[in-house]
Structure formats: structure tokens, C-alpha cells
Amino acid sequence: MQLDSLYQEVILDHYKHPQHKGLSPTFSAQVSHVNASCGDEIILNINLEGDLISELTWDGQGCSISQASVSIMTDLLTGKTLDQAAIILKSFSDLMASKGTSPGDELVLEDAIAFAGVSKFPGRIKCSLLGWMAFKDAAIQAQSKK
Ligand code: ZN
């Protein structure tokens, strides 16, 4: 898989130095998601204060794409409202569906645009979406408990 070298660096940096890794003992909801086709596993804890995502923590193992993506996602979504997070999630999902034709909206996605090139590789899209799908589930579960 060939990605733009700057983007590859962002992904490798998050893979080697994951952000928000290590599960918080308290959480509004906890979900675990598995990408069986690659062997990626992620557990995600979300804490909500009203509509604000006050904390996202995770643990997991798998390929560099899956682990870097959840690291970047937790960095990006912490401190956002659920409405803001939904917009970011939609933008990332659209980027992953673009088959390499979209550069991504850097204003919305920030470092997550590093995954733009991954959308050219159907086998890796599930890897990069794993953490985001876990977030979607966790947000729904946390809201239903309110
Ligand atoms: Zn993977």
C-alpha cells in the first residue's frame, strides 16, 4: 500500500505514540468492535457530560491503520459535542467511501485526512473505520442511558 509520505508519517506517529490509549475506569458506555478480516480489536469508553464528549479512552491491538485511526479519532472528538462529532463522523465516512477521489475536508477532519489514500484500498477501509464505528455505537449507547 502506497500512501502520501507525509500522511504515512502522521499514521505511523499515532501508531507508535497512541493518544488516549488506556481505558478509563469510569464511562458512560463501553463498546468493543472487531475487524475479523484483519484481526483488529478495539475497546472504546466514552464519557458524556450532557451533550459534550468529555472523555474518550480506548485499548486495542491490530494493524497500524486501525490503531492510528482510533488514536486520531479520540484526539479529534474529545471536547466536541455529539452534534459536532456526528458531522466529523459523516465527513470521515464519506472520505472512506470516496475510492481515493476525495482529498478530505481538512477543516473538519484535521489529522484524519491522513487516511484519504486508504480509501483506494477496499481491504483497508474497515481497518480505518473500526474505531469510528465503535464511537458511533458508544455514543448511541451513552445517550440511551441518559
Ligand atoms: Zn487492520
Image (cartoon, rainbow, N blue to C red):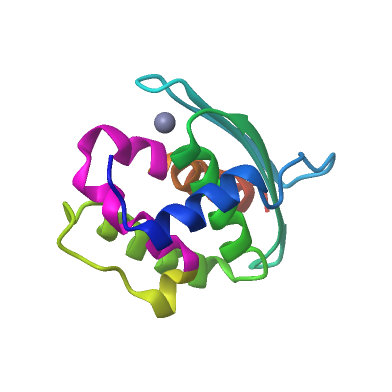
Where is residue 39 drawn, in percent x and y? 45, 20
Was residue 122 drawn as part of the magenta stretch in this picture? Answer: yes
> In this rendering, would 145 be left or right of 112?
right
Q: Residue furthest front?
A: 5
- Quadrant for ligand 1? top left
Was residue 18 drawn as part of the magenta stretch in this picture? Answer: no
Q: Quadrant of the C terminus?
A: bottom right
The residues colored magenta run: 111-128
In the rendered view, would you say 95 is above or below 62? Answer: below
Question: Magenta region's main secondary structure?
Answer: helix
Name the one closer to the observer, 145 or 108.
Answer: 108
> In this rendering, would 24 be left or right of 88?
right
Where is residue 8 drawn, in percent x and y? 42, 53
Where is residue 99 drawn, in percent x and y? 16, 51
**How many callouts does the rendering have?**
0
Q: Quadrant of residue 133?
A: top left
Q: Quadrant of the N terminus?
A: top left
Residue at x 34%, y 20% (from the top left corner): 37
> In this rendering, would 121 be left or right of 71?
left
Name the one closer to the observer, 127 or 135.
Answer: 127
> In this rendering, would 127 be left or right of 52?
left
Name the one closer to the observer, 145 or 78.
Answer: 78
In the rendered view, would you say 8 is above or below 44? Answer: below
Where is residue 140 drawn, in percent x and y? 53, 48
Residue at x 48%, y 55% (from the top left corner): 9
Residue at x 44%, y 41% (from the top left corner): 65
